[in-house]
Amino acid sequence: MKRRFAPLLAILLATSAGLARAGDAMSIGQMEFDNSCAQCHGARGMGDGPMASVLKNGAPDLTGLQMANGGVFPFSRIYQLIRGEGISGAHGSSEMPAWGFRYSLSAPTMLGPYYTKADEQAFVEGRILALVEYVSSLQKK
């Protein structure tokens, strides 16, 4: 019986080792992007995600933000857009979700039972900052 499971165990260990190496190379911002943004903006941020076609105006290509802003990445504007500042409702006046609100909702699960409001704020800001940093790395040169 043990011999039958040995090859399966070897495959699982090899696969998990490969995933661990891939996970080590992935930044928090890239994980956030892959989990929250790639569905619309595409894996490389070019606006070609699988959900882009169902959006009224498609999804913007995020790789040209810096170029469209005179060569300067619009950090503050992107941070505010992701956080949901200046838009009303969960989706505001656009189809872009207010991720800051979503991150706040997930804070209790992610932080555990003994967190403060300051911990929640730091958690939300950290996730948004990591995401903005990753989006800045997608810019066309």
Image (cartoon, rainbow, N blue to C red):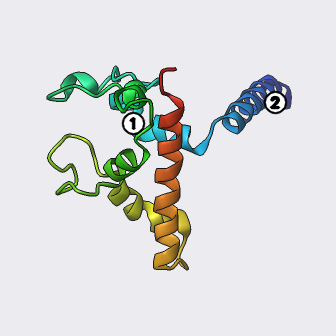
| Above or below: residue 90 compared with residue 36 | below
Q: Secondary structure at mark 1?
A: loop
Residue that badge 1 annotates: 37
Sequence order check: which comes first, mark 2 or mark 1? 2
Which amino acid type is marked by label 1? Cys
Of residues 96 and 34, the one drawn nearer to the viewer in this rendering: 96
Q: Could you tell me how many numbered marks the image carries?
A: 2
Q: Residue at x 37, y 63 (%)?
A: 105
Which x, y percent locates residue 63? 42, 25
Which x, y percent locates residue 99? 35, 51
Left or right position of 7 against 112: right
Which amino acid type is marked by label 2? Met
Q: Residues within 10 Å of mark 1 (few under 14, many from 20)?
A: many
Which x, y percent locates residue 35? 45, 39
> What distance separates the C-alpha of mark 2 from that of mark 1?
45 Å
Q: Residues within 10 Å of mark 2 (few under 14, many from 20)?
A: few
Q: Secondary structure at mark 2?
A: loop
Q: Residue at x 48, y 27 (%)?
A: 139
Residue that badge 2 annotates: 1
Locate the N terminus and report the quarter of the image it occupies. Answer: top right
Which x, y percent locates residue 71? 44, 30
Q: Which mark is residue 136?
A: none
